[in-house]
Image (cartoon, rainbow, N blue to C red):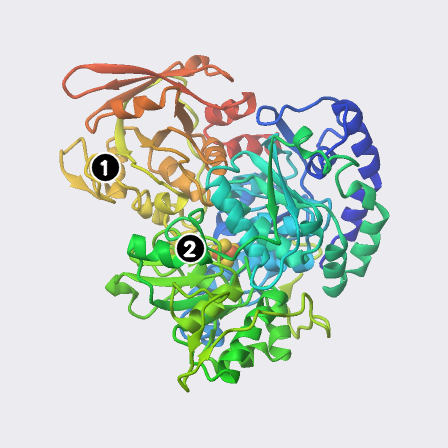
Amino acid sequence: MALFDLDMMQSLYAKLGERVEAARKVVGRPLTYTEKILYAHLTQGDATTVYERGKSYVDFGPDRVAMQDATAQMALLQFMQAGRPKVAVPSTVHCDHLITAQVGSSEDLSKAVVENQEVYDFLSSVSNKYGIGFWKPGAGIIHQVVLENYAFPGGMMIGTDSHTVNAGGLGMIAIGVGGADACDVMAGLPWELKFPKLIGVKLTGKLSGWTSPKDVILKVAGILTVKGGTGAIVEYFGEGATSMSCTGKGTICNMGAEIGATTSTFAYDESMERYLRSTGRDAVADIANTVKEHLTADAGVYAEPEKYFDQVIEINLSELEPHLNGPFTPDLATPISKMKEAALANGWPTKIEVGLIGSCTNSSYEDIARSASLARQVAAKHLKTKAEFTITPGSEQVRYTVERDGFLATFDEIGGKVFANACGPCIGMWARVGAEKQERNTIVHSFNRNFAKRADGNPNTLAFVGSPELVTALAIAGDLTFNPLTDTLINELGEEVRLDDPSGDELPPRGFDVEDAGYQAPAEDGSGISVAVSPTSNRLQLLDPFAAWEGTDLKGLKVLIKAKGKCTTDHISMAGPWLKYRGHLDNISNNLLIGAVNFFNEKTDNVKNQLTGEYGPVPATQRAYKAAGIGSIVVGDENYGEGSSREHAAMEPRHLGVRAVLVKSFARIHETNLKKQGMLALTFADKADYDKIQEDDSVDILGLTEFAPGKSLTLVFNHADGTKDEVVVNHTYNDQQIEWFKAGAALNIIRAQVAG
Ligand code: F3S
């Protein structure tokens, strides 16, 4: 408990009733749980006005900040620039993204510690200096560690990772942001968010047999698609919600990122109390129980949800089937009973090469216990596991406990390989044997994302997302068309056998245990600690401020790329091997947009350099424009920048001289990140104008001297043949964000304030 700031929680709870009452009065009706937490975290104190959902920009004061090592580097490099002596709110760093999964946990961890020494030393010393809790490599994946140690009902947290939303499983409003937002909050500044819309998901019935919480979110993803949650918070409720485990709720909230939701949450209930007590947080549970009535929606809200939510979805858990979502997108939902048909119709390879369980999404005690109950049947029923099988524990606490309880030994018996407590295969950090051959193949995993190349870098790997128990069953069968609910397997004795339903305890009957959780507390007084960044490092680079806006319209911008179709932050700033440059802006900029498809030739990383007429890689082309002192524009399709919170996807184009990104629509976090870095994030007023942009265009952006909230700008596409098209573009900048643009970046304003 030394890790958790109980005082902070107590002071929030002390004013919770008053704040909720004030909000109820202003809004003039009963409140949802989400609204209570949001209104309780207004930086201004009690609510005095009703915020319009999807419209009003609101200043919030989050209780915590969490950062993973890949994004923490840039967040903390930025924080160092802000000139403050200590972080203003409790903050933590988690070393989980930079460990390559290859041989097995201890070898992989030792190798990563050597390879990333410079980065870990930087993060450890910068954390020590500025009062930040530091979780060493091997301690676990950020979201699992947060759920086990820091999440609490009614709290608000931001984290520099899109799956920060996982903490909604413990009743938080937890939101993934870019490093620039984290930097603001650690510097004590308000955090601005557009007041979200509310989606209510009513869960009736009860999970049983093969169906798990993962299937709830896989189903929701199928209904809402990857864009359906954009700008909204999803609140789950109903008998189905209260009857499932706290960690299961975490899984559901975790994958809320896959529907683009701002976050997802559940009201406080007994499953959360059980989890808090089981993870050694009796004090948190006791205090939460004293304000229980504020930690759920007001009476009547869940009975008539249509009155209070913008959209309501109802799912009957008793009728819900296990699902597999994919390939290549997490919203392509197929119930397991339809998978055979779908696989054959689409020509998906049906042989499963690897089943992977674990990750931040699904490595709870319950997940591992239920998967182990299937693995145990392999020997008991004389079966042989057909596919490779891997386990990625979410934290050392979970790993230690499931090892103690014999589950890892069970997996070992079926040939399972335990990777380090880290992201590994979920983020492309998987040195998979043979992946370089780029063969078409199928894998199944219990992670959250399945974009092309996400797991092993092979664009021809078809990844399907399912619950850990379904993944385990499919790995045993080695066959994508196997439906464990109805089908039998032929065992080594030639007999037909059926797998029994998975089963397992929600929480360890003997409690959680751990020898060394891997935590380093910060120094009481960090003023004497120095943070060294070598000027010759190729992993870390201190930042130079971006230049302020020149005060004029922007003319003669070259079209760097007109991206076609899906362009996620993975396409804009690829992960995998590039993760090692997350702290070095110039080096990582060499991956700018290399995954995006060029509309004009349908190729990736191949665009026309308008200065030479030659085709070449995107980063080199942009560096040529920069060297010539010419700005450029990136054009994109729908939901541009979906996927993750990495601000590198905004900093890289800014660093290399791109001035504007013009798209049909943005993913929220990426749009905000662009604004923070002083870029112009623009949308077509008429989406059909996307078709008017030609490869050799030079583009003028007009109206910037009167840049104002709600006021459109004009773009002129000057075509090579001398003709031109003039189009109207929209933006969502408010007054403050326009100041960021003018100053060159949000950070430039913070630094000026501290200095002033
Ligand atoms: Fe890591 Fe994958 Fe979760 S990258 S934080 S395990 S989504």
Percent coordinates x, y for residue 646 in the rendering: 46, 45
Give the camera-side residue of 327 and 729: 327
Q: Which residue is mark 1?
A: 624
Percent coordinates x, y for residue 624 in the rendering: 23, 37
Give the camera-side residue of 253 and 707: 253
Q: Earlier in the sequence, mark 1 or mark 2?
A: 2
Inspect this view and state whether residue 528 appears: no
The residue type indicated by label 2 comes to Lys
Inspect this view and state whether residue 696 appears: yes
Give the camera-side residue of 542 and 69: 69
Marks 1 and 2 close (CB-CB < 8 Å): no
Q: Which residue is mark 2?
A: 338
**In the rendered image, which quarter is residue 514 located in?**
bottom right
Quarter of the image with the N terminus in it: bottom right
Q: Residue furthest right?
A: 290
Percent coordinates x, y for residue 338 in the rendering: 42, 55
Q: Which mark is residue 334?
A: none
Residue visible at 39% across and 64% down?
A: 430
* Crowding near the residue tagged with mark 2, few <14, some 14–19, many ≥20 C-alpha atoms within 10 Å: some
Residue visible at 52% across and 64% down?
A: 468
Percent coordinates x, y for residue 63 in the rendering: 69, 44
The residue type indicated by label 1 comes to Ala
* Crowding near the residue tagged with mark 1, few <14, some 14–19, many ≥20 C-alpha atoms within 10 Å: some
Residue visible at 68% across and 38% down?
A: 34
Give the camera-side residue of 474 and 71: 474
